[in-house]
Image (spheres, helix red, strand yellow):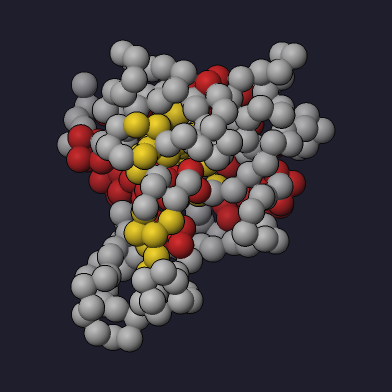
């Protein structure tokens, strides 16, 4: 519910009890259609194997953007990653959380397994680089604390930097189905890369509507090209391509 609200909470909605209490909000792509699929059994974690089971079903049901606000550090080469290739061949855009360990996605003994969150880092495993050249797009998301500072807990871009973006991930206001620190309002504040990721998924949905002639790979590239540069000049190991700039992306024109 919290991730879904950030993506597609309805515009101009009112409070939980039908009263305009000044607490309401709306999602980035407030007219988007949501397909919710359960792939984890608890508040934390999320296995690549569960995602592998879910992805073909999501694609078959028409998903164009797959938000992956979950993951762990098991990127075993024994997994069958063909479902991701097939989805990318179909033009799907994957938007995945980078993780909340404050690490940089870097190889250990030549492999990113153990130091990168999966499924976010799947295309960066040896033998998977072709995934980045498919019809679909692949985006890894880090979270900011404040306007332009990487959150201490957010994983850095590291070897995923070519496909890495950052956006707000601290004190994000969204929907919830139960009581919270705001009282029984139906809203709460959340943080972490899992809640930065849906903002980017919403941006992808907006761009797909604005530029229906573009495939998923092109849509992701527009976000990379129009991002606000942070940190070292250009694509860097911390912020990757930089801060998502939806306004600039929506104003993009063919060069």
Image coords of residue 188 (percent x, y): 39, 65
Q: How many marks?
A: 0
Is the residue 201 above or below the residue 118 in the image? below
Frontmost residue, 121 versus 80 = 121
Frontmost residue, 89 versus 49 = 49
Residue occupying image coordinates x 43% and y 56%: 190
Residue 123 position by quadrant? top right
For the C terminus, give its image quadrant: top left
Frontmost residue, 26 versus 221 = 26
Residue occupying image coordinates x 31% and y 23%: 230
Image coords of residue 176 (percent x, y): 44, 69
Residue occupying image coordinates x 71% and y 14%: 110
Give the side of residue 152 with respect to residue 118, left or right. Answer: left
Image coords of residue 89 (percent x, y): 56, 36
Give the side of residue 66 with respect to residue 55, left or right. Answer: left
Is residue 123 at all visible to an observer of this figure? no
Residue occupying image coordinates x 33% and y 86%: 17
Is the residue 211 above or below the residue 191 in the image? above
Frontmost residue, 210 versus 53 = 53
Residue 20 position by quadrant? bottom left
Is residue 118 at all visible to an observer of this figure? yes
Image coords of residue 147 (percent x, y): 27, 37
Residue lying at the far right in this picture: please name it: 78
């Amino acid at each position: 519910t919290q991730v879904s609200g950030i993506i597609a909470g309805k515009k101009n909605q009112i409070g939980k009890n039908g009263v305009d209490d000044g607490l309401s909000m709306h999602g980035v792509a407030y007219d988007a259609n949501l397909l919710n699929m359960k792939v984890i059994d608890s508040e934390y974690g999320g296995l690549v194997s569960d995602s592998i089971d879910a992805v073909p079903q999501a694609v078959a049901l028409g998903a164009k953007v797959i938000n992956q606000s979950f993951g762990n550090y098991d990127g075993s080469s024994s997994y069958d990653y063909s479902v991701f290739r097939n989805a990318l061949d179909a033009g799907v855009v994957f938007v995945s959380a980078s993780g909340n360990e404050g690490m940089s996605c870097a190889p250990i003994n030549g492999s990113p397994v153990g130091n990168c969150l999966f499924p976010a880092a799947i295309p960066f495993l040896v033998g998977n680089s072709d995934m980045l050249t498919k019809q679909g797009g692949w985006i890894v998301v880090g979270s900011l604390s404040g306007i332009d500072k990487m959150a201490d807990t957010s994983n850095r871009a590291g070897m995923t930097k070519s496909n890495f973006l950052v956006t707000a991930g601290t004190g994000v206001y969204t929907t919830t189905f139960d009581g919270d620190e705001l009282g029984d309002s139906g809203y709460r504040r959340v943080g972490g890369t899992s809640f930065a990721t849906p903002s980017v998924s919403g941006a992808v949905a907006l761009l797909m509507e604005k530029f229906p002639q573009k495939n998923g790979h092109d849509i992701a590239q527009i976000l990379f090209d129009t991002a606000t540069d942070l940190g070292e000049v250009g694509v860097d190991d911390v912020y990757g391509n930089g801060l998502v700039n939806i306004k600039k992306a929506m104003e993009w024109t063919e060069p």
